[in-house]
């Protein structure tokens, strides 16, 4: 839950994403669908049958040719925030889940205070918990209430779970918040979102223990999601290899997102939300 | 190569132990993690470079197995032997006082033992070794042994003595062995003994020349104004300034400084308390040889000795007896004589006791019957001149005694005892020892001879008194370390023991005659303890000093005969144990480093 000071700070910000939106009620989100709003967008040559009221006489005076003015149609955006609530998210000090919830609420607040609608989808084991669309400032409180009693559990297949999320027709923005420790990876889930015309945003949350494990000696590691347990003898060499794999894992995800125009942000659960996390969102182009 | 201790192969069982440690399951600590997703990828990646990872993870095991192998090999004591593994060697060690001279913290004997140890460790498995030490006596420490450990133990037990060395005796013994054993090698370790003309002996010179100052002698005497001691110091080295400290009965009483030129001898006068009994002089500065920096001296106490006179008066005899200043004459009867238990000598002149006193010595004049194994014969007039007998005992009475012109009226020839004075073939004076008590029997009347008027009569009587009432320490005068001392015990002694400076007691008597005292290796103050028949214990201090014949340690002789060792022993092999242990230590350090790096 965000406190009043945090919310006050967020009032000065907005979601920076652009989205193809079609349909829906009027909002303050710029839409790429050309419409009748007052904001000029572009010119094209006059074709018989066009609305003569759109003729730009200044352009005619200059070029002695007829051009039509085109305008942006202003409409609201649907923001879907998908939260990975698998058991692995209930790990870390502080818990990754707690951080993910705060980040989701932050984005929810920005969305609704920017005139957009937001819905939440929580992936927990085989279950998919979908909230209704929330709007306005009241929507933030409703979103908070929705997430309040959810606890991470079970294992989640991101691709399968995300594919099951229903989206209404039209474009929207979809933020996936997860640690991405899924056997089928995250690419399938992101590709599914892109296919369904969502502007995907990926927020990967990891804990300090996962990023800098402080283990040594013979260990029997038990997977919190019921995955294969394993015996390892942790030594300096193994830790170095782990770091390398972690960097490779993160790098691979980043590279995929970059290729597909998906903003990617890496968060650590012990980050300060209003400073470090917010800064990351802004640097990632998700918040402006 | 050969193995000196093949039984060391048992250490290879350690290999099984190391393998078992790695086979046994490790004790894993269970830990819940968010996901093993990344760990599985990491292990998979590690397995991808399998050969090197296996090697790295097993490196510790390989190191430990190698360490066990090295240890087993070291225990088996491999020897890279030279030309041959056999041969027999006799090692003779000079253990005289000079072998204790030190330079750079090591004594000459220590150097000799180190060199010998190297030879022993390089000897072949079949090589035999005999070790002799040449001190005052030759000691056999090891006899024809093939056991290396026993040999090394014997070498470690060699100790220098405080006297001189009988290297000739040891060499003779070694050569006697050489007559029976083929290809015997004789190696002599010494600092000053030169093997000249010894063509079949290898001489190993040890040590380097060092400067030394020694106290050659220490005496003390009473003076009118007290008592003074005199120490003679000799400088065997460069110019030196020495401080001589004097202790009287353990207390420091004087100290003097003397500056000596190279090779100079100086006398240092020291003041000592008048009541001092035991005096020790020592040079304060340390030099090449410390043992001769001390000298001991003990003042002799002169106690009164009682002589009981029984029989006719004899003024000549009495005067002759009284010439010893420590004598007190007591006249008594033959019945009362046995009750005088504090008399050292009983003189029976013309009378014979029915019962001899239980203690003391006896001077019997004109015995009428057999006494103390001496039987008087029929009296007769002398036909020949009076002479000293030709015997060792008679020799004790010969100093300044001529017996020229001695005439007797008559005498009873004596049978028994040892003759001292004779006339022709007849014994006039006989002496001896009976049950530990000395006696002298005179077979004629002194009144009826002119001998008492001769100058040599009191001299003879003095010799007789010294024989009958000897100074108990007469056999221990100027005793040196290693000397065997004989004591002339008091005639009233029922038991006697000698006590060393270290407090060790050696029983001398009974039985009588007293045993000689051999434990004189240590320089210092000794005590002769005699328990008399009366129960009284008389303690007489005496000293034993180190020899000064070994004090000049400025030069050491040259080694010789390196090429004389017989085939098979010239090239002493090299035992590899030390190298293997060094390699083992390096391996253990490597294992520690790998273990730390892995952790």
Image (tube, rainbow, N blue to C red):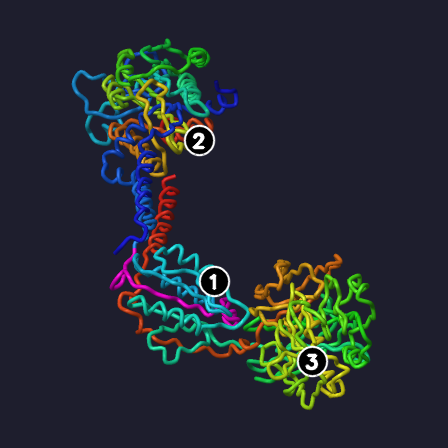
Q: CA distance from mark 1 to mark 2?
A: 82 Å
The residue drawn where x is 25% and y is 40% is B52
Sort mark 1 into few (<14), some (14-19) or many (20+) by Cα contacts within 10 Å. Answer: some
Return the residue found at the far left.
A48
**Label 2 SS:** helix
Question: In front of the other: label 1 or label 3?
Answer: 3
Q: Which residue is mark 1?
A: B158
Magenta span includes B571: no
Q: Quadrant of the N terminus of chain B?
A: bottom left
Q: Nearer the viewer, mark 3 or mark 2?
A: 3
Q: Indicate the position of residue A202 as horizontal and vertical percent values.
A: 33, 24
Subunit that carries the residue with mark 3: B
Spatial separation of the CA atoms under disc 3 and disc 2: 140 Å
User: Mark 3 sits on what residue?
Assistant: B411
Same chain? Circles 1 and 3 = yes
Which quarter of the figure is the C terminus of chain B placed in?
Answer: top left
Q: Residues within 10 Å of mark 2 (few under 14, many from 20)?
A: some
Q: Quadrant of residue A73?
A: top left
Residue tagged 2: A276
Query: In the rendered picture of this protein, how many numbered marks are placed on residues?
Result: 3
The residues colored magenta run B79-107
- Please give left or right for residue B181 compared with residue B498 in the image: left
Picture residue at 38% right of the left edge, 20% below the top: A89
Q: Is residue B484 left or right of residue A117?
A: right
């Amino acid at each position: 839950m965000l406190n009043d000071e945090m919310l006050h700070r967020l009032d000065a910000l907005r979601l920076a994403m652009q989205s193809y939106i079609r349909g829906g009620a009027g909002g303050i989100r710029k839409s790429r669908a050309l419409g009748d709003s007052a904001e000029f967008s572009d010119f094209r040559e006059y074709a018989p049958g066009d609305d003569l009221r759109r003729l730009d006489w200044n352009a005619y005076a200059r070029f002695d040719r007829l051009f039509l003015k085109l305008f942006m149609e202003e409409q609201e955006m649907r923001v879907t925030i998908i939260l990975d609530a698998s058991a692995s998210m209930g790990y870390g000090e502080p818990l990754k889940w707690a951080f993910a919830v705060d980040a989701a609420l932050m984005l929810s607040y920005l969305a609704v205070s920017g005139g957009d609608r937001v819905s939440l989808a929580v992936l927990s084991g085989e279950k998919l918990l979908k909230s209704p669309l929330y709007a306005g400032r009241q929507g933030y409180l409703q979103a908070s209430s929705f997430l309040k009693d959810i606890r991470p559990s079970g294992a989640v297949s991101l691709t399968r779970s995300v594919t099951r999320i229903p989206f209404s027709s039209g474009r929207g923005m979809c933020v996936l918040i997860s640690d991405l420790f899924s056997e089928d990876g995250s690419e399938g889930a992101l590709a599914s979102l892109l296919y369904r015309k969502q502007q995907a945003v990926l927020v990967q949350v990891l804990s300090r223990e996962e990023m800098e494990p402080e283990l040594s000696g013979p260990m029997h590691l038990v997977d919190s999601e019921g995955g294969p347990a394993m015996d390892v003898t942790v030594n300096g060499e193994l830790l170095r290899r782990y770091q390398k794999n972690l960097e490779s894992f993160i790098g691979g995800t980043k590279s995929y997102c970059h290729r597909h125009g998906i903003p990617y942000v890496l968060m650590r659960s012990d980050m300060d939300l209003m400073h470090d996390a917010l800064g990351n969102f802004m640097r990632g182009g998700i918040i402006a | 190569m050969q193995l000196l201790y093949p039984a060391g192969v048992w250490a290879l069982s350690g290999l099984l132990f190391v393998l078992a440690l790695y086979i046994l399951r490790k004790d894993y600590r269970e830990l819940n993690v968010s996901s093993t997703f990344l760990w599985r990828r990491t292990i998979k990646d590690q397995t991808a470079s399998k050969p090197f990872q296996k090697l790295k993870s097993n490196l510790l095991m390989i190191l430990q197995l190698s360490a066990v192998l090295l240890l087993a090999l070291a225990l088996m004591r491999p020897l890279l032997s030279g030309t041959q593994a056999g041969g027999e060697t006799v090692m003779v060690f000079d253990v005289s006082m000079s072998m204790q001279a030190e330079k750079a913290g090591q004594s000459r004997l220590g150097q000799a033992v180190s060199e010998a140890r190297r030879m022993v460790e390089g000897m072949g498995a079949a090589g035999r070794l005999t070790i002799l030490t040449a001190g005052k006596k030759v000691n056999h420490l090891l006899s024809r042994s093939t056991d290396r450990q026993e040999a090394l133990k014997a070498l470690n037990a060699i100790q220098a003595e405080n006297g001189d060395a009988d290297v000739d005796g040891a060499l003779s013994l070694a050569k006697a062995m050489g007559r029976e054993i083929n290809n015997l090698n004789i190696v002599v370790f010494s600092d000053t003994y030169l093997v000249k003309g010894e063509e079949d002996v290898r001489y190993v010179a040890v040590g380097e020349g060092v400067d030394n100052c020694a106290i050659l002698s220490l005496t003390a005497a009473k003076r009118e104004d007290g008592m003074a001691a005199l120490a003679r110091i000799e400088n065997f080295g460069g110019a030196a300034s020495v401080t001589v400290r004097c202790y009287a009965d353990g207390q420091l009483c004087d100290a003097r400084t003397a500056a000596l030129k190279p090779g100079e001898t100086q006398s240092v006068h020291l003041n000592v308390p008048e009541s001092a009994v035991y005096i020790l002089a020592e040079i304060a500065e340390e030099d090449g040889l410390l043992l001769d920096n001390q000298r001991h001296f003990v003042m002799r106490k002169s106690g009164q000795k009682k002589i009981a006179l029984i029989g006719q008066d004899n003024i000549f005899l009495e005067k002759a007896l009284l010439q010893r200043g420590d004598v007190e004459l007591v006249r008594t009867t033959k019945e009362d004589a046995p009750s005088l238990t504090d008399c050292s000598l009983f003189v029976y002149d013309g009378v014979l006791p029915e019962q001899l006193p239980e203690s003391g010595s006896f001077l019997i004049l004109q015995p009428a019957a057999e006494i103390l194994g001496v039987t008087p014969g029929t009296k007769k007039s002398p036909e020949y001149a009076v002479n000293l007998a030709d015997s060792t005992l008679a020799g004790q009475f010969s100093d300044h005694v001529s017996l020229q012109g001695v005439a007797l009226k008559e005498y009873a020839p004596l049978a028994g005892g040892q003759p001292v004075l004779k006339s022709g073939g007849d014994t006039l004076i006989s002496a001896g020892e009976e049950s530990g008590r000395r006696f002298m029997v005179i077979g004629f009347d002194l009144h009826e001879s002119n001998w008492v008027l001769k100058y040599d009569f009191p001299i003879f009587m003095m010799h007789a008194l010294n024989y009958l009432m000897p100074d108990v320490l007469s056999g221990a005068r100027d005793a040196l370390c290693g000397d065997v001392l004989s004591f002339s015990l008091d005639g009233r002694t029922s038991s006697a023991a000698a006590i060393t400076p270290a407090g060790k007691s050696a029983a001398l008597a009974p039985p009588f005659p007293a045993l000689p005292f051999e434990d004189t290796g240590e320089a210092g103050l000794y005590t002769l303890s005699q328990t008399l028949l009366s129960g009284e214990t008389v303690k007489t201090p005496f000293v034993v000093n180190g020899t000064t014949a070994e004090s000049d340690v400025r030069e050491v002789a040259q080694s010789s005969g390196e090429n004389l060792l017989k085939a098979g022993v010239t090239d002493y092999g090299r035992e590899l144990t030390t190298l293997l242990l060094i390699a083992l230590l390096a391996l253990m350090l490597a294992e520690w480093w790998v273990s730390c790096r892995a952790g």
